[in-house]
Amino acid sequence: MARDYLMAGNWKMNKTPSEAKALAEAVKAMPKGEGTRKMVAPSFVCIPAVAEVLAGSDVELAAQNMSSVEDGAHTGETSVLMLKELGVSSVILGHSERRHIYGESDEFINAKAKLALQHGLDVVLCIGETLEEREAGKANDVCFAQLEGGLAGIDAAQMAKIVIAYEPVWAIGTGKTATPADAQAVHEACRGKIAELYSQSVADAVIIQYGGSVKPGNVAELMSQKDIDGALVGGASLDAESFASIVAFDK
């Protein structure tokens, strides 16, 4: 089954609103191949400026996180209701930095995912193992547990609004990248796990992105793997020229 490529830039805690606006203008102008989608995820404070630039364009606007509840006494949190009003259509959940720096559990991430879906947002659910877990031969087990925990209570119909992003923790911001064969092996295993949890047709339709030191020099080979359907790009998405090469990897 043909799946679109989803090339997404996660800007993390980078770019002021004025800088983010300029980068969004550049992303909007970037050419892409047929069957490729563009997405950016600015910081919360940059979303309004970026939303203004991207309105009516082919670039999808994502948030990097959100609260597990709609409103209330949650100092420092951002609600799904706020994101929707700003024009956000997707939210990244379970990023390894949220899991490992801020201690977010699968159950907590799952509560966010269900709330996002309830409000019509798409979800990019991040999974991935640490170097210690990979060296212990547990990469698949860790990813499977994160899939099962993150997708608990989400039905087959809702899976049409879920993207999986496999990001080996040891490859994020380190310059190390899983080899295309390594990445493909985990993507294939995760697609198999989704088939087991849902059905083969659901698994065949799910976009599974790769993330972890994706660069212009390695993107084409990564995307040539049959179960890799795009990239969740960190550092390389902060430079317009670099991200443009990634978006147009097949041109």
Image: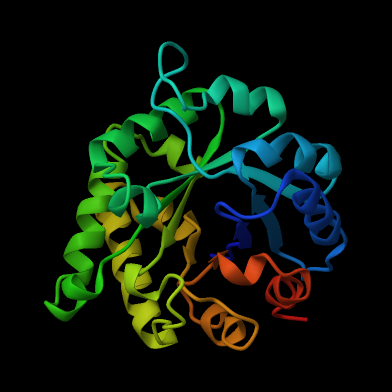
Q: Is residue 108 above or below residue 92?
A: above
Q: Could you tell me residue 94's position as x and y percent?
A: 37, 47
Q: Residue 174, located in which quarter of the rendered image?
A: bottom left
Check the picture and name the quadrant holding the C terminus: bottom right
Residue closest to the eye, 224 or 52: 52
How are the colours assigned in the image? rainbow
Q: Residue 237, located in which quarter of the rendered image?
A: bottom right
Q: Could you tell me residue 153's position as x and y percent?
A: 28, 32
User: Which residue is drawn at the image coordinates 54% and 76% (left, top)?
Assistant: 214
Which residue is outermost to the top? 72
Q: Is residue 169 above or below residue 200?
A: below
Q: Is residue 37 above or below residue 189?
A: above
Which residue is outermost to the left? 136
* Number of dots carrying numbers: 0
Q: Could you tell me residue 110's position as x and y percent?
A: 32, 36
- Residue 30 appears left or right of 77: right
Q: Could you tell me residue 97's position as x and y percent?
A: 38, 54
User: Which residue is drawn at the image coordinates 54% and 67% (left, top)?
Assistant: 229
